[in-house]
């Protein structure tokens, strides 16, 4: 029945496109396999109602290889980010849209009904139905050995999971007693919440479906500790390191680790088509070369990458521009989507009681912010191209207000000194350093992950201006793991790290980055851990303004209208700007994007960020194409 309804549409479109001179529908890479009977024809590989993408521009062609450069083999997971095939994803207006799903409905913010596409298949040709979502829910998320802590936090509301009703092969419903405001956004994340899994492949590694003796043999053969470890290893949908694992992404990995070159090939059952009904992606192959991080800019400048943003920075721009003509590429300047290129995070949960008392005084945090010459930093480090700002939402966000950006950001040493005097830091030592309550000079040790010379350059300028306030800045760089441990344990006084990931939120997106609800937030990690663990670890919030943010976050979670959520967001952003819980410096820093002249369809302008744009993801690289 499915084919009888679908073939006339294909034939009609094929006739129309043949008359207009359009290219043959079947990707040439697959044509020989179709002719040999090894692969179904395109009309039989697509869902009955594929997703029709409007992203393609120009006169796209099938074929070719897109070359990428990564610095570590684990970075092949970027193909999940770039491919951006999601049950629900963001469109370019950052609104939710069905992708893998045919459509979905949300009732009262707590009842989610998902409709799958009839005829959709995994990359190995097996049907993609609600069985994939059932397998995940019953055999992974609720298996005590595979998921000892139960379902992921995004699927719990008040620590309670949803009722899951499988209506039929194409319809599934998730129902919570209260709203789950983060469910859709987690599905749309760069690292998505995978609530489906290819059970038809994974059952062979699952205790429930195998004889114990046979399963033990498989475990031994795999070299894993037990069946749980083996199942996890086989099902790493984000890491993409198992070429046998069926996928729903536009390209599938064919190379096992360890390797220095990975080849991804087109998924013959990918569910998207262009407006002429040609199956996507256009590009046949993605070739990823692993090179040292320090060489990526040089190799991109030598024309060895077709699409490169990763491991490039504004400091590479001049060099890259000089080689454009010689090596046949263009350098686009996209905008970074982080709230601040780098931000300073005073540690409000420091173990040092004298410092903790000082840094919890909003006047001190404001003085630190007023003592930063953002204009100088912008001119010297970023060629005047950045936006001097707090660590807050960007002008492209519907939640943006100019006062969020400008509060306490003017370079004003007189005002900063007055605030420090008002706190009671009038006394100074012979070197002009202010003396803290315990009589020790105000020497601030700032911790960084030591991953960027750009950070060092920025800090040198801040060091000079803070010295004029009677504050001595010392810098301690360490590896990221050590850096995080020092902050989380309270050993760090203050730290520097990139600002909020998502500088372009809408009211429907979670405000958690602005509230003390996660341990990985460097300004209040102990409070965040307390929230995450329901009070089992960490410290209870001791600052009224921070507690107000946590309360607002809870209100946002329970809100059922977008108007209420927008109002709550406004309150959160206002408190953040007034309280200066993190100190932004500049944002909207231009990001060089190297695009070879043979690669077409890449937008001239875009936002390059982890969330919500998934770097290139929401621009749909499956619609980019090669013209030799």
Image (spheres, rainbow, N blue to C red):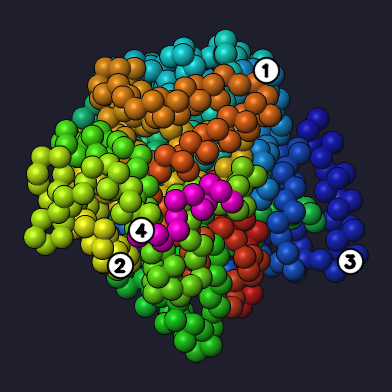
Q: Residue at x 30, y 17 (%)?
A: 535
User: Along the polypeptide, which appears first: circle 3 or circle 2?
Assistant: 3
Residue 414 tag number? 4
Q: Quadrant location of the C terminus?
A: bottom right
- Local packing at callout 1 (Cα closer than 10 Å; few below 14, some 14-19, many 20+) is few
Q: Quadrant of residue 477?
A: bottom left
User: Along the polypeptide, which appears first: circle 3 or circle 1?
Assistant: 3
Q: Residue at x 55, y 25 (%)?
A: 556
State the CA–CA distance, disc 3 to disc 2. 61 Å
Residue 461 tag number? 2
- Local packing at callout 3 (Cα closer than 10 Å; few below 14, some 14-19, many 20+) is few
The residue that disc 1 covers is 108
Q: Which residues are magenta?
A: 402-413
State the CA–CA distance, disc 1 to disc 2. 51 Å
**Is mark 2 in CB contact (under 8 Å) with mark 4?**
no
SS for callout 1: loop
- Determine whether, in the image, residue 182 is placed left or right of residue 528: right
- Local packing at callout 2 (Cα closer than 10 Å; few below 14, some 14-19, many 20+) is some
The residue that disc 3 covers is 20
Dot in front, 4 or 3: 4
Residue 68 visible in the displayed image: no
């Amino acid at each position: 029945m499915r084919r009888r309804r679908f073939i006339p549409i294909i034939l009609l479109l094929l006739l129309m496109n043949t008359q207009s001179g359009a290219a043959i529908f079947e990707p040439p890479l697959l044509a020989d396999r179709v002719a040999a009977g090894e692969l179904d024809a395109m009309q039989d590989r697509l869902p009955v109602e594929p997703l029709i993408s409007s992203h393609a521009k120009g006169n796209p062609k099938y074929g070719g290889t897109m070359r990428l450069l990564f610095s570590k083999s684990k970075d092949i997971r970027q193909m999940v980010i770039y491919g951006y095939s999601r049950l629900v994803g963001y469109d370019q207006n950052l609104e939710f849209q069905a992708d893998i799903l045919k459509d979905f409905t949300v009732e009262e913010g707590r009842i989610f009904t998902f409709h799958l596409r009839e005829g959709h298949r995994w990359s190995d040709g097996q049907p993609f139905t609600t069985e994939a979502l059932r397998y995940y829910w019953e055999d992974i998320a609720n298996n005590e050995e595979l998921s000892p802590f139960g379902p992921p936090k995004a699927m719990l509301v008040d620590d309670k999971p949803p009722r899951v009703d499988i209506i039929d092969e194409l319809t599934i419903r998730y129902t919570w007693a209260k709203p789950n405001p983060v469910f859709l956004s987690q599905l749309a994340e760069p690292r998505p919440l995978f609530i489906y899994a290819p059970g038809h492949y994974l059952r062979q590694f699952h205790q429930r479906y195998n004889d114990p003796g046979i399963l033990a043999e498989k475990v031994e053969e795999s070299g894993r500790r037990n069946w749980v470890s083996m199942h996890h290893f086989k099902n790493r949908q984000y890491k993409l390191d198992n070429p046998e694992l069926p996928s729903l992404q536009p390209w599938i990995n064919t190379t096992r680790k360890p390797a220095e070159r990975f080849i991804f090939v087109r998924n013959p059952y990918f569910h998207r088509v262009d407006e002429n009904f040609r199956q996507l992606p256009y590009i046949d192959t993605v070739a990823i070369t692993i090179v040292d991080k320090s060489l990526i800019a040089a190799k991109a400048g030598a024309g060895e990458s077709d699409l490169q943003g990763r491991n490039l920075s504004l400091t590479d721009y001049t060099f890259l521009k000089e080689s454009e003509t010689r090596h046949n590429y263009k350098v686009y300047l996209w905008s970074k989507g982080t709230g601040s290129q780098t931000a300073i995070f005073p540690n409000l949960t420091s173990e040092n009681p004298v410092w903790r008392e000082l840094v919890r005084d909003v006047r001190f945090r404001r003085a630190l912010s007023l003592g930063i010459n953002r204009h100088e930093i912008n001119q010297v480090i970023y060629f005047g191209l950045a936006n001097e700002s707090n660590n807050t939402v960007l002008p492209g966000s519907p939640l943006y207000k100019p006062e969020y950006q400008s509060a306490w950001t003017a370079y004003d040493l007189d005002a900063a000194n007055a605030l420090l005097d008002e706190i009671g830091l009038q006394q100074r030592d012979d070197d002009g350093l202010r003396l803290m309550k315990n009589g020790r000079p105000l020497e601030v040790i700032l911790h960084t992950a030591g991953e960027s010379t750009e950070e060092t350059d920025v800090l040198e300028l801040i060091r000079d201006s803070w010295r004029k306030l009677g504050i001595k800045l010392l810098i301690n760089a360490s590896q990221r793991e050590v850096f995080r441990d020092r902050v989380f344990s309270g050993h760090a006084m203050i730290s520097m790290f990139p600002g909020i990931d998502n500088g372009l939120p809408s009211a429907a997106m979670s405000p958690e980055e602005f509230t003390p609800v996660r341990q990985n937030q460097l300004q209040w990690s102990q409070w965040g851990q307390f929230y995450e663990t329901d009070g089992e670890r960490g410290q209870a919030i001791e600052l009224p303004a921070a507690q107000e943010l946590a309360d607002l976050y809870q209100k946002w979670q329970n809100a059922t209208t977008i108007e209420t959520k927008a109002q709550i967001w406004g309150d959160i952003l206002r408190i953040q700007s007034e309280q200066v819980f993190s100190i932004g410096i500049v944002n909207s820093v231009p990001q060089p994007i190297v695009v070879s002249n043979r690669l077409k369809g890449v937008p001239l302008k875009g936002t390059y960020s982890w969330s919500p744009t998934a770097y290139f993801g929401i621009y749909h690289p499956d619609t980019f194409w090669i013209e030799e």
